[in-house]
Amino acid sequence: GLKIATIGGGSSYTPELVEGFIKRYDELPVKDLYLVDIEEGKEKLEIVGNLAKRMVEKAGVGINIHLTLDRREAIKDADFVTTQFRVGLLDARIRDEKIPLKYDVIGQETTGPGGFAKAQRTIPVILDICKDIEELSPNAWLINFTNPSGIITETVLKHTNVKTIGLCNVPIGMVYGVAEMLDVDVERVSIDFAGLNHLVWGTHIYLDGEDITERLIDSFAGGKSMSMKNVPDLPWEPEFIKSLGMFPCPYHRYYYLTDKMLEEEKKEAATVGTRGEQVKKLEKELFELYKDPILNIKPPQLEKRGGAHYSDAACSLINSIYNNKKDMHVVNVKNNGTIADLPDDVVIETNAIVDRNGAHPINIGHVSTKIRGLMQSVKAYEELTIEAGVRGDYYTALQALTIHPLVPSSTVAKKILDDIINQNKEYLPQY
Ligand code: NAD
Ligand code: G6P
Ligand code: MN
Ligand code: MN
């Protein structure tokens, strides 16, 4: 039987993961699932862990759920380690969202300075976790969901010996979105993806293997829109979509519709609160539901969170590695020449064939000039963000923020950086 360790087990998303393992139990016999959290997350871990226990009992599968604050016990001899932790909890996210807004810059948990701050807090922790894996389960696969997912995955690949694949639910969310637009079963749709995490473009769309990109661009441009629960659903401009000739991801709105998105964020912050503030309320409601001893399935209310389809992505990836399936997934992996316009050692988000040796990306070559520059700029920002996060170097951090396309100047970058460092002192041992 398999041993899985999930770091950040108190997450409200855990029932999705458990549902994913239950659904696949015949092929993927998970024997032990260790849900790991920290002192501050103890109460959440208890509540969600007890729901997980009721779920496996109801399903009648032999998965043993273990709740623990002892990370090393969980990691020891694990086959897979999955990560879904949030350093600094939601209060840190809310600060990340608010600091940039003070300076009229997009305030978002993964995109722009908010994502930079989250990366600086998360890098020391992920490196620690990897030390445990290197020592206690050197053959384990690390399946990373922790945001900023692409940056964290690249950190692990560049600075540790741990085998890792990064995941995000945006690509699968786009596949579901297209299936909905076409009103067809989701299995009939596939998309070629190229780019970076939360900056991924759908370059071709297929229905039953037939390329329908052009037809779909027209209806997409005609006002149809897709988004995630956590990204304001502002409509795309039809001329823009036609001129792009491919499908932006929901997060591209922050780059292509910056002015409107900033206005929207400020409006939300002043009324319903930032997304982090909204999630705080949603989470309270969810955990109240989770406490109900009668509840023994994943409640549908979880769909109000941005991470829908999370389990499909994580559990089916683990299944493909374990069963050597050689099927296609959209993952965050080392570029290694896949996109000719980026360095070899960086992480990209793309289609890959997954087998027991990991993810093998499908070659892309050069990308369109329309998207090349933005992709390269954001990647350079990410590379510097990792270097700053590992070394705790103020000057590298300042360069990272200054070159980010959503930051207007070095003056603003410095103000934001100083605020980030001041407000995150306890989480930035490297600085
Ligand atoms: P959350 O706030 O519920 O945090 C999850 C748990 O992590 C909490 O119970 C918390 O106590 C715990 N935690 C904090 N620091 C920890 C540490 N050092 N070690 C172990 N546990 C720790 O967060 P969430 O909303 O469930 O999201 C979790 C993470 O997953 C975030 O980083 C989020 O951005 C990410 N996420 C990513 C995707 C994706 O598409 N890649 C989708 C959903 C969520
Ligand atoms: C999307 C993204 C995730 C992100 C989540 C936020 O699913 O792909 O990377 O963590 O949204 O959702 P939330 O409900 O926390 O705002
Ligand atoms: Mn994501
Ligand atoms: Mn600029």
Image (cartoon, helix red, strand yellow):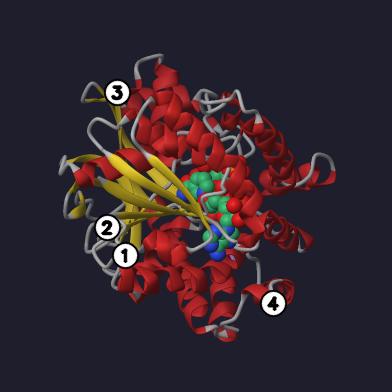
Q: Which residue is mark 2?
A: 339
Identified by mark 3, the residue type is Glu
Image x and y of residue 387, in percent: 46, 78
| Residue at the spot 47% in from the left edge and 30% down from the top edge | 55
Image x and y of residue 32, in percent: 35, 46
Give whichever of discs 2 and 4 has the lower sequence position. 2
Pointer 4 and pointer 1: residues touching (CB < 8 Å)? no
Q: Is residue 235 left or right of residue 139?
A: right
Q: Which numbered dot is residue 425?
A: 4
Please tell me whether mark 4 or mark 3 is closer to you in this view. Answer: 4
Q: Which residue is mark 1?
A: 342
Q: Quadrant of residue 228?
A: top right
123, 244: nearer the viewer: 123
Identified by mark 2, the residue type is Ile
| Residue at the spot 74% in from the left edge and 77% down from the top edge | 422
Q: Which residue is mark 3?
A: 187
Image x and y of residue 177, in percent: 45, 27
Evaluate whether residue 96 shows in this view.
Answer: yes
| Residue at the spot 70% in from the left edge and 37% down from the top edge | 282
Alpha-carbon span between mark 3 and mark 2: 27 Å
As helix, strand or loop, the secondary structure at mark 3 comes to helix
Identified by mark 4, the residue type is Lys
Tell which residue pokes out farthest to the right in this image: 270
Give whichever of discs 4 and 3 has the lower sequence position. 3
Alpha-carbon span between mark 1 and mark 3: 31 Å
250, 241: nearer the viewer: 250
